[in-house]
Amino acid sequence: MDASSDHALNDELLSDIQRLSFDYFLKEANPVNGLVADRNTAASPASIAAVGLALSSYPVGVERGFMTRSAAVERTLATLRFFWNAPHGPEPDVTGYKGFYYHFLDMRTGRRVWNCELSTIDTALLLAGVLAAGAYFDADDAPELEIRRVADALYRRADWRWALNGGATVTHGWRPEKGFLRYRWEGYDEALILYMLGLGSPTFPLPPESYAAWLSSYKWKKIYGRDLAYAGPLFIHQFSHIWIDFRGIRDAFMRNVGSDYFENSRQATFLQRDYAIRNPKGFVGYGENCWGITASDGPGPQQSRAGGRRFFTYLARGAPFGPDDGTLSPWAAIASLPFAPEIVLPTLRYFHEIDLHDGNPYGFTASFNPTIADAGGRPCGWVSPDHVGINQGPIALMIENYRSDFLWRLMRGVPAIATGLRRAGFSGGWL
């Protein structure tokens, strides 16, 4: 295949995957309140993180012609109005408290379900989408003026200092029944976006000391000859990068090690492929074009224990230190596209060749496990029956960042992002 036809195939495949992934937010949502289902199953509650990804995706949909601007305005306004007006307080059956929101909400009523936690990270992902909406809808008509006004009000309502609970780092969350969760955002993880939004707040900002405390908890490792701030699941290296362009900007930690977070995620992506090529546990299918280990559904213990192996259901899988049961996630590879297109694009084509999109309404399957043989003989083996909202968003958005830098450019102009980065000690590059 010559270079031009190779490029055309890549572009066609990316366009197709992006459109199908975006469709999740159009179809698995309640248009009355803008809530987006955690999964494409009948009884699924809404995930507030999926809502944040949806709000970030609507501008991409407008730019790509997937939806009209008026439809995007209508859906965005319904979402923002819902979160601003929904029951808010310390009671156990509301939508949020102190400007934070419960992880899972009833799709119809928008109230807390499953006695879940008031989640700081999921609220951060929601608010990142809220700010993206406020940045994109810049017309002077009444609906878009309202989008900007309510987006700003929602961001200002979050009390980040409360979320510290008297400690140096931010807690994972809170429950009305028992108070704050015992865990905090420490160690290199997906909380980079959380700290930026918390530091950038004009009302209840985190102190810079909280970010310094987080940096002090990183683990810097050399694995397979690659140096990086380590985290096993690939999503940790991707989520904050959906909204923030970390190319060439550095905080104190990255200045000290001579890297930046974009390069760190590039190394993490290559590390995943290194692990798949080595395949130390001998799983079926792993190789240079078949990798991607992250938080995902899995086949679960009901599957036969092939070769004495254990299989898990939903789990934050990681490489190279595990846990790993042979389950791979196409979205994990795709969301690394901006970091390492030279290894992600061949992997995408391979996923296409083994029919991971067969029968899936929103693109590739969420996860698969070739070690568990498929009754029909498909080389992908076991395939997840569900699609998940927080998988679909990174696909559509990171494909767009790779193709056009669209969301990165949009978010550079958001005062909260620039302020948060500067308060965290970032400098250089576009900042």
Image: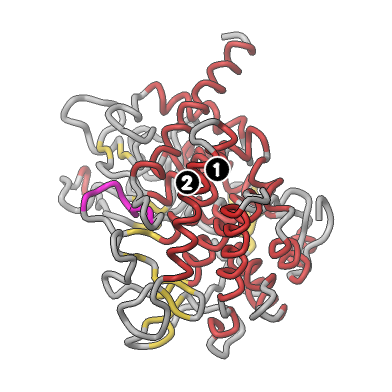
Up-down relation of residue 312 to residue 363 (above or below): below
Q: Magenta stretch mostly in which secondary structure?
A: loop
Residue 263 in picture, x, y percent from top left: 69, 48
Q: Which residue is identified by label 1?
A: 397
Element type where label 1 sits in the image = helix
Q: Residue reaching furthest right?
A: 428
Give the side of residue 170 with respect to residue 101, left or right.
right
Label 2 element class: helix
Query: Magenta stretch containing residue 360, yes or no?
Result: no
Report x, y in % for residue 404: 67, 35
Q: Nearer the viewer, residue 280 or 55?
A: 55
Q: Nearer the viewer, residue 431 or 308?
A: 431
Which residue corresponds to mark 2?
A: 393
Q: Residue at x 45, y 41 (%)?
A: 331
Q: Viewer-proximal residue, 55 or 383? A: 55
The crowding category of the residue bearing disc 2, from other C-alpha atoms within 10 Å (few below 14, some 14 to 19, many at least 20), is many
Whole-percent x, y for residue 147 in the image = 57, 57
The reply to whether callout 2 and callout 1 are in contact (CB within 8 Å) is yes
| Residue 380 image offset from top left, x and y in percent | 31, 31
- What's the coloring here? secondary structure
- Residue segment shown in magenta: 35-42
Q: Residue at x 45, y 79 (%)?
A: 97
Amino acid type at mark 2 = Gly
Name which residue type carries label 1: Leu
